[in-house]
Image (tube, coloured by chain):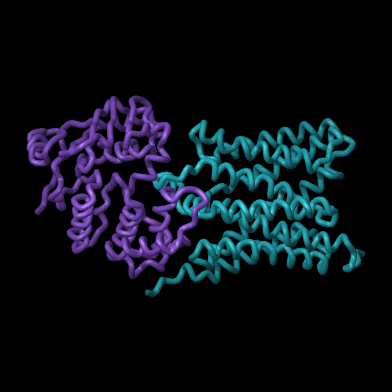
């Protein structure tokens, strides 16, 4: 039984708030820029990195971060070089990262999926450390600052990349920056719900906000709030019903999205 | 008298991604500052490809493109900051979370440069241009909820708002209602006359041939087949039995 006043719970709650905020925020860009499979690929790259870390006795979070950020940095330029959409390159990178993960796991068969690697795959919010919180706070601050600074360009690219190019915006660095950010956010949020469920946190809050709002500026504020609320409520639900934390958060997030679709005013005719 | 070349294409061929056949082939073209040029031709003649090659959205596989004295391949971003472009058939999904005002304001973002935020001057300018095109009354409505004609006017306002030196219009009048079909081309003509903006208009419908047009380029199968005064080009096209009939109304 975990005492509600314990440090573990406080860290878990702060982790929920930060991960919900980050994934909700960055998810808006992932959805609008049609980078749907990036999150999927990033979590598996992080998993491969964590497996390597365990096999070589290096901090798995560090190796996971190296793997996912390197993959993120490669996707954009490779997509441009191959003249394919980033999603296509992601689909090629995804099985590769899984293959690498399994190879690394065979290097340390005694550890397998039962240790830190497992916590990256399934999530382990109660094992969140103070250092994890610090990393997430730094990432929050850096992401918010950069998004505010380059909001004008990102706003335009989210509307239509080709038009943004036609207006004289060099879109490539911004797309690469968002892919990189998705990679880092996914890696640092893995302890919350795990690699297999992280996409739900990335895409559901943004998709929910898009059901109700007609203004991108409101969506970019609403999606992180939805993300935070979902993470906190899902976490509390898991404590009350004794369910896995990640699964509770994802199930709740999907239910909220389904309700949003049903209630969405966007399917009504616009009067004016 | 025209003073200088603002667009110069030498032996240019462009191909779209995944296609082997060049969409435009061996194009040699010079446009002088302040010219108003119609580019006509049937579907798949290469008209849109020519515009996209000029503003660097499509990098040619062969030849050189120079716009406003800059090599488009190396300095495409700088070129596009000074060129207004209205793409063909740009219709926004009804669920898009952008207002008509947002779409027009975005036209200035490239020219404003990185890190600079739009202020009241830019917003005022947007409303002025929207009023000129008759879409100021829908400024705060979602772009996707506007009619095709209104969206087209918003797109023209977007290209116009950054005060371009070159204006590229790709079938920009096709979705307009009858009243706007006379008024909007008239505004483009006025802009061209008053500010000397070099204007390239791609169309396959010549029902609104502008007074200021002194040059017409006819394309077919990716090549320029006629280039000269509109009357002369149309006469040549009439004699070509293989060329689809170009309709001139009014």
Task: Please give the letter of the chain rendered in cyan.
Answer: A
**Residue located 87% across and 60% down the image:** A8
**Residue located 70% across and 61% down the image:** A251
Quadrant of res B179: bottom left
Q: Residue A8 vs residue A180: left or right?
A: right
In this rendered view, identify the residue nearer to me: B65 or A260.
Answer: B65
**Residue located 69% across and 63% down the image:** A228
Relative to residue B26, is residue B58 depicted above or below? below
Quarter of the figure that contains the C terminus of chain B? bottom left
In this rendered view, identify the residue nearer to me: A150 or A15.
Answer: A150
Q: Residue A4 vs residue B48: left or right?
A: right
In this rendered view, identify the residue nearer to me: B230 or B222.
Answer: B230
Relative to residue A239, is residue A175 depicted above or below? above
Residue B76 pos. (x, y %):
40, 37
Whether residue B241 can be seen here: yes
Chain B, hue in figure: purple
Residue A25 pos. (x, y %):
62, 57
Q: Residue A140 vs residue B104: left or right?
A: right
Residue A168 pos. (x, y %):
42, 45
Quarter of the figure that contains the N terminus of chain B? top left
Residue A59 pos. (x, y %):
83, 40
**Residue most extreme to the bottom:** A271
Relative to residue A22, is residue A80 depicted above or below? above
Quadrant of res A55: top right
Whether residue B144 can be seen here: no
């Amino acid at each position: 039984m975990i005492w509600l006043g314990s440090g573990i719970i406080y860290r878990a709650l702060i982790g929920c708030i930060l991960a919900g905020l980050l994934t909700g925020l960055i998810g808006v860009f992932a959805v609008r820029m049609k980078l749907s499979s990036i999150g999927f690929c990033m979590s598996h790259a992080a998993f491969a990195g964590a497996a390597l870390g365990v096999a070589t006795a290096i901090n798995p979070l560090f190796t996971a971060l190296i793997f996912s950020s390197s993959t993120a940095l490669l996707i954009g330029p490779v997509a441009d070089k191959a003249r394919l959409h980033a999603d296509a390159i992601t689909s090629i990178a995804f099985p590769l990262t899984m293959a690498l993960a399994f190879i690394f796991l065979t290097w340390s068969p005694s550890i397998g999926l039962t240790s830190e690697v497992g916590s990256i795959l399934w999530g382990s919010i109660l094992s969140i450390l103070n250092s994890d919180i610090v990393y997430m706070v730094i990432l929050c601050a850096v992401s918010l600052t950069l998004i505010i600074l380059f909001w004008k360009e990102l706003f335009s690219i989210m509307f239509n990349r080709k038009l943004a190019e036609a207006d004289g915006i060099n879109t490539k660095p911004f797309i690469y920056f968002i892919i990189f950010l998705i990679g880092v956010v996914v890696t640092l949020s893995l302890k919350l719900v795990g690699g297999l469920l992280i996409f739900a946190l990335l895409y559901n809050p943004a998709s929910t906000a898009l059901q109700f709002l007609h203004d991108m500026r409101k969506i970019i504020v609403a999606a992180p709030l939805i993300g935070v609320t979902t993470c906190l409520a899902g976490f509390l639900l898991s404590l009350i019903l004794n369910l896995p934390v990640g699964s509770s958060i994802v199930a709740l997030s999907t239910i909220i999205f389904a309700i949003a679709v049903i209630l969405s005013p966007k399917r009504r005719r616009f009067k004016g | 008298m025209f003073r200088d070349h603002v667009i110069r294409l030498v032996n240019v061929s462009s191909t779209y991604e995944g296609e082997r056949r060049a969409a435009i082939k061996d194009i040699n073209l010079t446009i002088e500052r302040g010219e108003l040029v119609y580019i006509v031709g049937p579907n798949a003649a290469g008209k849109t490809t020519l515009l996209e090659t000029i503003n660097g959205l499509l990098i040619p596989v062969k030849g050189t493109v120079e716009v406003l004295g800059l090599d488009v391949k190396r300095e495409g971003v700088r070129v596009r900051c000074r060129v207004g472009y209205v793409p063909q058939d740009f219709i926004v999904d009804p669920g898009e979370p952008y207002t008509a005002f947002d779409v027009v304001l975005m036209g200035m973002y490239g020219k404003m440069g990185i890190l600079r935020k739009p202020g009241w001057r830019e917003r005022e300018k947007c409303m002025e241009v929207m009023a000129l095109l008759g879409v100021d009354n829908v400024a705060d409505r979602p772009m996707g909820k506007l009619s095709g004609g209104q969206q087209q006017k918003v797109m023209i306002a977007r290209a116009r708002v950054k005060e371009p030196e070159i204006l590229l219009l790709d079938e920009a009048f096709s979705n307009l209602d009858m009243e706007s079909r006379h008024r909007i081309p008239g505004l483009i003509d006025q802009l061209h006359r008053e500010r000397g903006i070099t204007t390239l208009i791609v169309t396959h419908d010549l029902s609104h041939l502008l007074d200021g047009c002194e040059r017409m380029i006819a394309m077919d199968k990716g090549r320029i087949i006629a280039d000269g005064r509109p009357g002369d080009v149309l006469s040549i096209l009439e004699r070509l039995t293989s060329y689809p009939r170009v309709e001139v109304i009014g």
